[in-house]
Amino acid sequence: MIVLGIETSCDECAAALVEDGKLILSNVVATQIPFHREFSGVVPEIASRKHTEWIYGVVEEALSRAGKTARDIDGVAATAEPGLLGSLLVGLTFAKAFAWSRRIPFLACNHMLAHLYAARLCENAPAYPYIGLLVSGGHTIICRVDDFDAVEVLGTTIDDAVGEAFDKVAKHYGLGYPGGVHIDEAARQGDSGAFAFPIPSLHKGQHRYDVSYSGLKTAVVNQLEQFRKKGRAGELNTSDIAASFQKTAVEILLRALITATDDTGIKTVVSGGGVAANSYLRARLADRDGLTCIFPPKELCGDNGAMVAGLAFQHFLRGDSSPLSADASARVKGFKRRYP
Ligand code: KG4
Ligand code: ZN
């Protein structure tokens, strides 16, 4: 079964063809980064307008790169939640129209479940259950995963998402946009022990799997202000800041994650989302004794249509489909939260 997956939840206009939930026939990601760079963040109005202009061409490109036509598509899916409402509606409406005109099944997908599915597009899909580590610009979720759509949230951020912290720190230090990848790069030249940033102590009671990034973000931002006040801003080594911030950000994640793997006894971790591309996070988890950690290839960590097509295939296989009246939602629905 060939599924066309469409993803327009934020600033990537993406479409992919995936066969049987596994084989990626094409994966086209048209990024809007240059249009949002001057604002140092995604401008919702620009994002939805660009999606409207690009979606047809991006889907055509995905079909052509796969050597297929619309007639070869057996099912179509689009991200319906969470994300920027105006952006979501573009991909969702396109997918519905495609499904209606071709009389094929349609599925409205959850973006976070799609990120979690990305690792299953690889050679050896891990056996359930595992602990999911979903880390992106909008979300930070530690969850127990029992099936492609059976996810129980154990912990989440109580304030900023980890990707958001990367982006805000990079913006403050003028490291580039979007921030995560620039901090990752700058940190390679820096000393991660140069600055000691605070790690929140949440690992007790009902917050034992939760994380917090606002304190770290404020501390890193204040560092520059302190140097400025002393007239020494020029002496601040931004690579050291990047490395020290990144080390602390990852440490915060790992503490909550390890608490979850210890408590549940589930020793396989599957990651997804833009921050899963972070080289320091990948390195720290690679040499963690007693844990098997699986990351999607870097090109499948950020937003893409292949993860949507893969997830939708599993739903179609089970006989699920969505009505053409399915709506978009800015917030995550259907994720259960369990307090320890
Ligand atoms: O999953 P994604 O593409 O979009 C959302 O669903 O939010 O994630 C985007 C986030 C941004 O915050 C970006 O800075 C971060 O992923 N990111 C990274 C890296 N590459 C992207 N963060 C840390 N290290 C990276 N290499
Ligand atoms: Zn995403």
Image (cartoon, grey):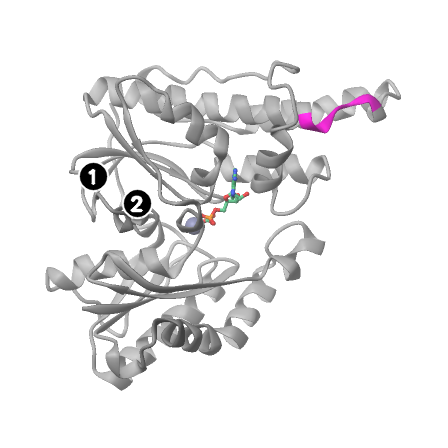
- Residue count near mark 2 (Cα–Cα under 10 Å), binned few <14, some 14–19, many ≥20: many
Above or below, 265 against 148 in this view is: above
Q: Secondary structure at mark 2?
A: helix
Name the element at disc 1: loop
User: As displayed, is residue 121 above or below residue 204?
Assistant: below
Q: Residue at x 32, y 20 (%)?
A: 258
Towards the viewer: 85 or 68: 68
Under mark 2, the amino acid is: Ala
Residue 333 locus on image (x, y percent): 30, 50
Task: Name the main secondary structure of what is drawn in magenta.
Answer: helix
The segment highlighted magenta reads 235-239
- Name the residue: 83% across, 25% down: 233
For this view, does 151 lie left or right of residue 12? left
Above or below for 280 versus 4: above
Identify the image quadrant of the N terminus. Answer: bottom left
The image quarter containing residue 189 is: top right
In percent of the image, x 22 and y 58: which residue is there?
21
Farthest residue, direction left:
318
Name the side, left or right, on which 306 lies relative to 102. right
* Sequence-first tag of 1 and 2: 2
Q: Tag on residue 119?
A: 2
- The quarter of the rendered structure image containing the C terminus is top left
Mark 1, residue position: 126
How far across and down, in percent of the image, does residue 38 sit?
71, 55
Residue 229 position within the rendered picture, expressed as x and y whole percent measured from the top left? 85, 21
In magenta stretch: residue 24: no
Q: Are the residues flagged by discs 1 and 2 in contact, CB closer than 8 Å?
A: yes
Number of the label disc, if any, that sits on residue 337: none
